[in-house]
């Protein structure tokens, strides 16, 4: 029973990781842009949300409504101002540029919000739970999982079925050939990064509700997002979702074995996948 | 008769290496022009320069008399020029239909008008209907070339640039692909066909240009130029080769 409980809690934790991983699946998995500032953007959005909630007494839903469009704008700006200048087949320039941005953002956040941990008051939803046959399931993690599933479904459909999705996949496959087909790759990439960071607006609210955030926390989110995308397989949105589940379940079971072992268990499973199936669970080659 | 597309002293370089030395060409509405020349003569560079894939001065390329040199590639497509690039350059990982749909999407976005539809393309190359769901990387070379041509046509071009569409294909497949060109011309599309096979180039065009080391060394009606003239222009006999 306690192992089943660990599995359930792991899946719920996976829902949170999926919210970090979706933007990464789009940027790293599809566009092959390495965005080191991914986690820091989550934290930045969280801190902005917390400050707004404190200043104006906003509820979490209102904060979400504000943070998602703000994330979209930040993503668009990130692509226009920085990433479009370094875009190309070589992932190194984008890695270095966003690594610098990551450090700058962390210091900026430290300057504004100090190193204290903060969280978003959730009007009680963060502590409510449901008792199902002896297993207590938190209401908030269920909401997180449902939202993550909805976002995955929406993003997958956008990539497969829409004009924008096809244009993005075409540009990711061959930027020059995409331009020869009438696609403006910079405009398509700007929209894609806007969507990726917009999704982080969801992650920012839920992260701040279920736990605390501090300016230096971004690195952990970054590594979970990378791991989830690689476990799932590059270029697959549902793969990133399943990869998040694998990571969440590994950690859930690891925590049950020993509270200090949880995070490490996730990394070990990631390394096992990398060693035995480097293309990822849903990767093609 | 005024030219649809013309180049005026077109110069292009890759860094320090100059690849084109003042190329003057003209393409009239509905006309097919062949561009022949040996490897490294500058044929592909010429097409890339027209498409805005290399930096060139504005006045060097004119479309309907309007200077368009150096316009970004996607905007050139919007203005009515499409290219079947060397090496086909399909969107790998995507199906045949999705590859074609990318062009349909963009033509719709730009409000491009033209007669090319998926149905008409399937009449031209029936195999593409059959393979609609197949990922492009598992097609044969000839089938991939058909997708590349289809993708360019679905951009609804007034001018189609074809870069060595026979390269690496079996003679039977080459005949099949070249058999489609008259129908494309019948739709009113003007064409520049870059080709290494001189016989093929002559039969598929009204006029031809021969290039050598970044310069035009011969131009004339395809039916009139002789093998000897082409031989001289192609290999540079009688020209001072640097």
Image (spheres, coloured by chain):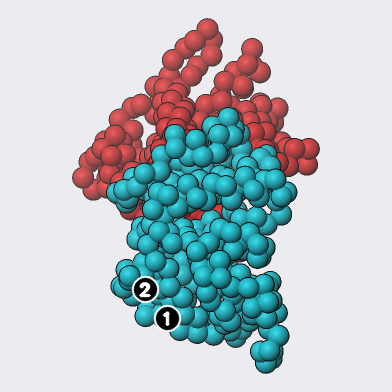
Residue A210 location, quadrant: top left
Task: Give me the disc on residue B8.
Answer: 1
Disc 2 sits on a residue from what chain?
B
A192 or B130: nearer the eye? B130
Report x, y in % for residue A218.
51, 51
- Give the residue at x 55% y 39%: B125
For the colour cyan, the matching chain is B
Q: How many marks?
A: 2
Q: Residue at x 67, y 39 (%)?
A: B138
| Residue B60 location, quadrant | bottom left
Q: Quadrant of the N terminus of chain A?
A: top right
B39 or B240: which is nearer to us?
B240
Are the residues flagged by discs 2 and 1 in contact, CB closer than 8 Å? yes
Indicate the quadrant where residue B65 lies: bottom left
- x then y, percent, for residue A264: 69, 40
User: Residue at image x 44%, y 34%?
Assistant: B119
Residue at x 21%, y 45% (from the top left corner): A56
* Residue B92 image offset from top left, x and y in percent: 60, 46
* Viewer-closest of B65 and A188: B65
Is A179 on the left or on the right of B88, as rendered?
A: left
Which residue is under mark 2?
Answer: B62
Seen from this angle, which residue lies furthest top? A133
Task: Report the chain shown in red.
Answer: A
């Amino acid at each position: 029973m306690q192992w089943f409980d660990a599995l359930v809690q792991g899946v719920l934790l996976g829902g949170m990781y999926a919210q970090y991983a979706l933007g990464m699946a789009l940027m790293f998995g599809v566009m092959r842009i390495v965005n080191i500032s991914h986690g820091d953007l989550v934290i930045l959005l969280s801190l902005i949300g917390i400050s707004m909630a404190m200043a104006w007494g906003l509820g979490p839903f209102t904060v979400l409504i504000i943070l998602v469009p703000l994330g979209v704008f930040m993503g668009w700006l990130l692509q226009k101002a920085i990433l479009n200048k370094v875009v190309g087949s070589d992932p190194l320039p984008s890695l270095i540029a966003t690594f610098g941005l990551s450090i700058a953002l962390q210091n900026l956040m430290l300057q504004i919000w100090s190193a204290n941990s903060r969280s978003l008051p959730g009007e009680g939803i963060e502590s409510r739970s449901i008792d199902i046959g002896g297993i207590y399931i938190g209401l908030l993690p269920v909401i997180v999982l449902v939202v993550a599933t909805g976002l995955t479904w929406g993003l997958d459909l956008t990539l497969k079925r829409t004009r924008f999705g096809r244009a993005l996949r075409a540009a990711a496959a061959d930027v020059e050939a995409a331009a020869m087909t009438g696609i403006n790759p910079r405009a398509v990439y700007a929209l894609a990064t806007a969507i990726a960071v917009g999704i982080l607006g969801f992650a920012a609210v839920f992260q701040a509700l279920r736990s605390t955030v501090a300016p230096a926390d971004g690195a952990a989110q970054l590594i979970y997002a990378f791991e989830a995308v690689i476990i799932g397989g590059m270029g697959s949105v549902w793969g990133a979702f399943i990869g998040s589940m694998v990571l969440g379940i590994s950690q859930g079971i690891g925590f049950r074995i020993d509270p200090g072992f949880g995070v490490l268990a996730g990394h070990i499973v990631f390394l096992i996948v990398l060693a035995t199936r480097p293309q990822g669970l849903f990767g093609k080659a | 008769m005024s030219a649809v597309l013309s180049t005026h002293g077109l110069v292009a370089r890759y860094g320090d290496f100059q690849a084109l030395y003042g190329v003057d060409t003209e393409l009239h509405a509905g006309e097919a022009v062949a561009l022949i020349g040996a490897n490294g003569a500058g044929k592909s560079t010429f097409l890339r320069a027209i498409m805005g894939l290399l930096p060139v001065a504005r006045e060097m390329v004119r479309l309907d008399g309007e200077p368009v040199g150096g316009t970004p590639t996607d905007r050139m497509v919007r203005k009515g020029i499409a290219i079947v690039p060397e090496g086909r350059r399909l969107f790998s990982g995507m199906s045949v239909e999705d590859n074609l749909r990318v062009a349909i999407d963009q033509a719709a976005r730009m409000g491009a008008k033209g007669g090319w539809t998926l149905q008409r393309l399937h009449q031209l190359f029936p195999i593409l209907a059959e393979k609609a769901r197949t990922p492009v990387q598992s097609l044969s070379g000839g089938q991939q070339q058909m997708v590349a041509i289809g993708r360019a046509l679905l951009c609804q071009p007034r001018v189609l640039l074809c870069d060595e569409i026979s390269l690496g294909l079996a003679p039977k497949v080459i005949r099949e692909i070249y058999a489609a060109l008259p129908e494309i011309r019948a739709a009113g599309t003007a064409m520049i066909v870059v080709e290494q096979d001189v016989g093929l180039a002559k039969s598929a065009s009204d006029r031809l240009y021969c290039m050598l080391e970044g310069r035009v060394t011969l131009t004339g009606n395809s039916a009139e130029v002789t093998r000897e003239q082409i031989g001289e222009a192609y290999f540079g006999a009688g020209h001072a080769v640097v």
